[in-house]
Amino acid sequence: MGKLFGTDGIRGVVGENLTADMAFRVGQAVAEVLREEKNGERPTVVIGKDTRISSDMLESALIAGICDQGGDVEPVGDIPTPAVAYLTRQERADAGIVISASHNPYEHNGIKVFNSQGYKLPDELENRVEEKVLSDRPMEHRTRGEIGRRHHGMKQLKRDYIDFVASTIESDLSGLRILVDCANGAASATAPELFGRFKAHTVFLHRTPDGVNINARCGSTHLEDLADQVRAEGYDIGVAFDGDADRCLLVDETGSVIDGDKVMAVCALDLKRRGLLRGNAMVATVMSNLGLHEFCRNYGIDLICTAVGDRNVLEEMLRRDYRVGGEQSGHTIFTALETTGDGQVTALQFLQVLARSGKKASELASVCASYPQVLVNLEVPHSGGVKEKIMASPQLAEAVRREEETLAGEGRVLVRASGTEALIRVMVEAKTSQIAQNTADRLVSLVKSLDF
């Protein structure tokens, strides 16, 4: 991992460690690297953003930087992250850039770059971009006819993406009553028109972004409001997106959460029964619940686990040519359809299975049990390499070993550093919630006691 690019692009608090000046230089560097790759030819970049107050500023700076280096830009406005990946391919652009910090609060933002095929930018190109951004050498400005242009056509491109997502299922979803939480984010710009294409009765929550309410007590990280209304008003299912709509979580008719593990299980089992589960396998991460492992054993599906991060999941899926993978947090990838996780595609895949089954959502999701799980996020300083020092601590390693011994195969412990935030995550699964909580509490106390 570089100094700027983490596991999901560049992230930071706007005005602190992510500024308009930096975005300008990133735009310059992306365009310059692309020109080098094209032997001096003019590159084209698609740019989309979520609804944060800072996204317009960062978009303007990126566009200025790209045009400064002779690149052309197609801005598509407020739109989900996976839409940028899709439109980059459709428009045969050389790269796509998303301005978003996903599920994080509004004061955060980020810059993520896709290559021409709609995949996250390879490490080698990221490193070249980063080197140029951090260099003391100013990038030479283009002039006269070499300056890049900003193209228009935002509304049609957004419609193209909605057309594509709608085409990924055959069912018209008739008979379903659906409540959708747009998280006051990018889904607000696409979900109402998308779900309007189907015969389900769909109502929307949190679809009035004001720049600062993205992910605020709503969306996939705050399911309480959605669950309460689904249960109180008799909906068949609730759908929740995060700020950039690349992840999706659901709640069943009782208000219980259907997480990414359960979504993968339901969709993989449906594909298996229809003879479409490539390799009879799916890909998850080490954070997936033990219940998913149990589900795969029960139904004869192979489960491959990677390190945390949808990028790691996707790389393994492509390497093995598998079709279903994802994370418990709601990033689900269907490689037969897209090059990245897409919350709206995920929602439609699950809803189609639900409509075909004639079952209640709770019954459909019951194929995959959930062991009690406790996840604690510990904030640590951004600087000084504190995350790395904690993870290298012999005391922590010994404590984890002891706790795993105590669980004796009836649970597990995972302590890891977040790749995108200044957090240490402590996750414990066990036979009971109390055992999981007590184990997590002991590990959290130890981490807090470490002196770095």
Image (cartoon, grey):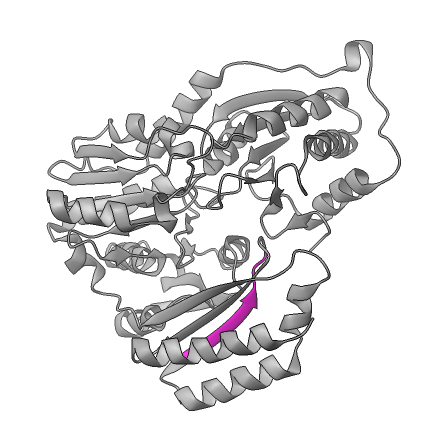
**What residue do we see at 63% from left, 76% from top?**
450
Q: Is residue 93 visible?
A: no
Question: Percent x, y for residue 17?
Answer: 68, 43
Highlighted range, magenta: 412-419
Find residue 339 and report its horizontal and vertical position in percent.
49, 43
Residue at (67, 48) in percent of width and height? 5
- Residue closer to the observer: 217 or 75: 217
- Secondary structure character of the magenta stretch overall: strand
The C terminus, quarter of image: bottom right
152 or 447, which is in the foreground? 447
- In the current view of this chain or complex, which residue is farthest to the top? 144
Evaluate whether residue 204 shows in this view: yes
Residue 432 versus residue 103 in the image, above or below: below
Quadrant position of residue 274: bottom left
Q: Quadrant of residue 367?
A: bottom left
Where residue 415 appears, as percent x and y from the top left, is 53, 72
Mark count: 0
Q: Along the line of sight, which residue is nearer the eye, 69 or 64?
A: 64
Along the line of sight, which residue is nearer the eye, 341 or 229?
229
* Residue 313 in the figure: left or right of residue 237: right
Q: In the image, is residue 417 part of the stretch drawn in magenta?
A: yes
Instruction: Answer whether residue 192 is magenta in the image.
Output: no
**Image height of 327 relative to 396, above or below:** above
Residue at x 47%, y 68% (from the top left corner): 286
Q: Quadrant of the N terminus?
A: bottom right
Residue 337 placed where, x, y %? 40, 42
Relative placement, left or right, of 177 versus 116 is: left
